[in-house]
Image: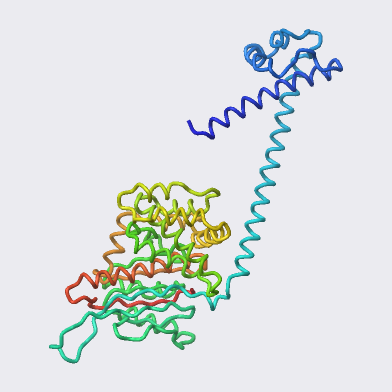
Amino acid sequence: MPDGLLLGGLALLLGTTVLIWTATGLAGLLAHGSWPEGVSFTRTPMAIRDLAADPRDLAAAWPGVDPSHLSGYGLFWGLFIGQLLILAVLTVFAVGTVTRARAVRAARRSHRTQEAAPSGTDVRPLPAQAPPVEEESADPAAPSAPISAPAVERVAEPVPAGPVDAGTDPVVPGSQAGDEETAVPQARIQDAPGAVLVATSDTALWAATKDARAKLGPVHLFDPGQLCDTPDRLRWSPHHGCADRATAASRAAALLAPLRSSRPIDAEMHSAAETLLRCWLHAAALDDRPFREVHRWAIAKTTPADPVQTLRTHPKASPGAAGELEATLTGHPERRRHATELVRRALSPLSQLHVRNACTAARADRVALESFIDETGTLYVVGEDPELMPILNALAQSVVEHGRRVAARSSPGRLGPPLTAVLQLPL
């Protein structure tokens, strides 16, 4: 039996006993001017049993009390019901007061956190590695050496689209304005020979290019904010693949990247938040739990025990992960509080039902996401709500990392044709 149910039953019995005792005494006091002699708290449980058999016979319920000192059953039950109503009103008032007080404290903490955060120009997402791509060589006979792909820098301004080739400089913001900002990415998307990743807040870009891209391969849309007018949306679980420690670490960093502060004083807090989120993602993936469980752990009022237990007992858990999580949860209280608050901010969109559904992937969604590069497909990652940026950024980086793995498995060690990345998220 759950402890809460047991305690609730005991509280109900004790409360009923107190109400019956006080109702009997107060009824006698009002009817005869004095508390009936013999009406004691220790005798009340037996009186309750007799009243349950005959609610009108107070004298039988209290055999040790002179019947002339007791009131009628109407006054007794009226006082009992009145006490119940008073308790109900006081309970509702207390619950409302506590809830409002907690909401005010949470709003103040959120306001202080926002004031302490740097301006939007200082928030920089974690650079994601672009997949290795095929580059043309002037000498066909020249041996090809392994080439590492450059990082793709996500910036707050629209980024020009195009294949990310090895040996080139990182992508930087262009100087387009007006219609040119839309026309150039649209042309690059439509002319791309291989798979395309489009991360944008512009739904018009999706509407203008999806039909042309559908002729080359499957078109998928990850739209947790439901901005696009279509019921056909891809779902993605942010903890997918996090049974691997390295994947969990990169996923946690990507989820927290849009919230990263450039101030050195916040480095320890951000590191603790990454450790918390990495361990929770790792535990959820190992235990095959839905992503909403990670959100539940983050918003829990008390320290969740499930992830620690999973990391300690699961045979595939990363060595030392349980100790890292416990050390972070039991470490410096202020740092733990700020780290937990940062994770809550990153996962706050999951309080909305449509976002939770978008982050609950089925097997078909996972297969579609893993195969779209090989099938010359197109993935649109669409969103404009700043709260959704952690999830959108994590998916974009996950796709780029998947492209690197696909390239590593191929015989030439590169993608051919290359993956084209159009990155326009307002990070």
Q: Residue at x 71, y 26 (%)?
A: 81
Q: How many numbered markers are drawn?
A: 0
Residue reaching furthest left? 141
The answer to whether residue 21 is left or right of residue 393 is: right
Residues 110 and 186: in front is 110
The answer to whether residue 317 is left or right of residue 180 is: left
- The quadrant in which residue 252 appears is bottom left
Asked if 183 appears above or below 195 in the picture, the reply is below
Q: Residue at x 57, y 56 (%)?
A: 333
Residue reaching furthest right? 33
Give percent across and percent down for residue 189: 34, 78
Residues 293 and 326: in front is 326
Asked if 376 appears above or below 343 in the picture, the reply is below
Give percent across and percent down for residue 238: 39, 60
Give percent across and percent down for residue 198: 38, 73
Residues 290 and 13: in front is 13
Residue reaching furthest bottom? 138
The structure's colour scheme is: rainbow
Give percent across and percent down for residue 370: 28, 64
Asked if 215 appears above or below 77 in the picture, the reply is below
